[in-house]
Amino acid sequence: EFALPFALKIFPNMLPSTFQDSLKEEEKMKRELQTRISMAGFFQDTLKELAKEQKKVAQKKVDAAIDKDNSTDETRALAQEASAADFLEFLDKARKGEP
């Protein structure tokens, strides 16, 4: 029994076919598992990168919306100031009787 592993290493065909098949299946399963693990790691890295890119795009959209909202508020304020100034000017003209 002690020499069996060494003999099998030197003469791999000494094993009966049932042992050989089970060893081949086990090796195949190990290879498949390693492949699946490496693929899972690759997909996780890819998803992390995509998430970062999507986050950047979403942040840009939020920033653009905030800028647009701020500029809209500024425009409204200017329009209100202008309309108030126009109204006061109209009142002055109306008091003086100018058209």
Image (tube, helix red, strand yellow):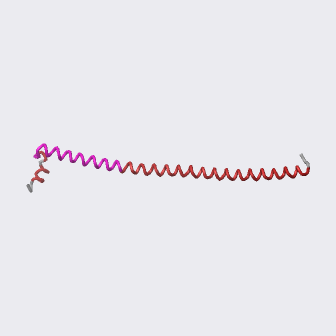
Residue 24 covered by magenta stretch: yes
Q: Is residue 32 shown left or right of residue 74?
A: left
Residue 38 covered by magenta stretch: yes
Tell me which corner region of the image, top left, top right, bottom left or bottom right, holds residue 22.
top left
Query: Among all residues in the image, which is located at the extreme right?
Result: 97
**Horizontal and vertical percent for residue 73?**
68, 52
Which quarter of the figure is the N terminus placed in? bottom left
Which stretch did the figure color magenta? 14-40
| Number of marks drawn | 0
Which quarter of the figure is the C terminus placed in? top right
Give the residue at x 49% y 50%: 53
Magenta span: chief secondary structure:
helix
Give the residue at x 91% y 51%: 96
Give the residue at x 56% y 51%: 60
Give the residue at x 76% y 53%: 81
**Horizontal and vertical percent for residue 43?**
38, 48
Depth check, front residue: 84 or 63:
84
Q: Is residue 42 shown left or right of residue 5?
A: right
Depth check, front residue: 5 or 46:
46
Depth check, front residue: 54 or 11:
54
**Horizontal and vertical percent for residue 91?**
85, 51
